[in-house]
Structures are given as structure tokens and as C-alpha cells.
Image: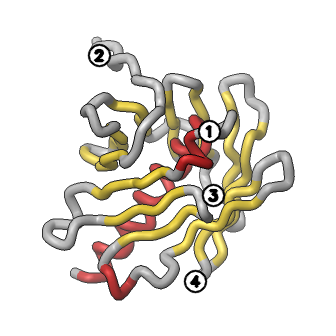
Amino acid sequence: MSEPAPSLAPIGSSPLKVRKKNRILTADDPSGATVVRGTPGQDVAAVLETAGGTWRIQSRVDDVRQVYDRNGLTVATLRHKTMRGTDVELPSGESIHVTTGNLQLFGIGCKVGDLASARAPFLAPQRYFKLALNDALLGRADRDLLVALSAYLTEIVVSAQVSAQN
């Protein structure tokens, strides 16, 4: 019988230290408290948890993934655009673009619109990366969802960049 997962701290500060170990994604705040946990799902690509909610990311169908809340309502759509990143589309009509941008000169990393940026350390970038959240993101009502999706999507981009270097 597995132990229950420890409780998650509320999201309130930046940067987050994001890592993936044994297929479990975690994002820790500067004090070391875990604020995001992502695990593989049985019938979905991933389950993301924060203190403010739980979301399920559907497996990709035609470069599109739906994101559902615990009630089964669609809260976001992820559209992968080959060679151009991923768009996070919210029900309000807002679209947030996740891309590597022009960060190649400065090492491994990516941007989540104007809301967050990820940067892996120069030495041993495969171990973890820092996800810097701006004040606009921390002040949003949907910050838990957006921070969880940012950690999930930036981990995919950073892992791909690390693999491409090896």
C-alpha cells in the first residue's frame, strides 16, 4: 500500500526549482516546499496537482491536448505547433505561447508568454531548472493552473533541449 502524497504549499513566490525524477515532476518554491506535483495518469498523459486544484492532461490527439479540472470541465487546450512551440488556450480566449525563443545563446530554457521563463543551469542541465514567475502571473486568479501547466510544458521543452545536446 502506497503512502499518501504530502500536502502541497500554496504558490506565492518565485523562482521555482523544477525537476523530474522517476516520472514524477515536482516544483519547489525558494523555501524548499513543493508547490506543484505531476504524475503520469492511467488514462491521461499527466495529472498535475497544486494546493489550489488538480488537473488532468489528456493524451495528444492530432497535436491537441485538453486539460480538465477535477469536475471534468475543460479549463485549457494545449496546441502543439511543430517547430513553433505550444499554445495554451484558455476558455476566456486568451492564448499563451510557450517557445524556446532566442534563448539558445544563453543556454537551455524557454518562455511561457510574458508570464514565466525557464532556465537550466549551464553545468548539469538535466538535473533541474529554475522557473521564474513574474508578478502578473502570481497575481492572477488562475495562477495555480498556469503555474502547473508552465512547469509541465517547460519540463518537456528543457528535456528536449538537453537530449538534443547529447
Residue at image point 33% right, 49% down: 18
Q: Which mark is residue 2?
A: 2
Q: Which residue is mark 4?
A: 83
Q: CA distance from mark 4 to mark 1?
A: 31 Å
Q: Which mark is residue 139?
A: 1
The number of numbered badges drawn on the structure is 4
Q: Is residue 43 left or right of residue 108?
A: right
Q: Which residue is mark 3?
A: 60
Circle 1: element type: loop
Q: CA distance from mark 3 to mark 4?
A: 16 Å
The quadrant of the picture occupied by the C terminus is bottom left
Q: Tell us which disc is closer to us: 1 or 2.
A: 1
Q: CA distance from mark 1 to mark 3?
A: 30 Å
In the displayed structure, 135 sits above or below 84; it is above
Question: Considering only order in the chain, which callout, 2 or 4, is on the residue closer to the N terminus?
Answer: 2
Q: Residues within 10 Å of mark 3 (few under 14, many from 20)?
A: some
In the displayed structure, 105 sits above or below 44; it is below
Amino acid at the residue labelled 1 = Gly
Return the x and y of residue 51 as percentages of the image width and height. Answer: 50, 23
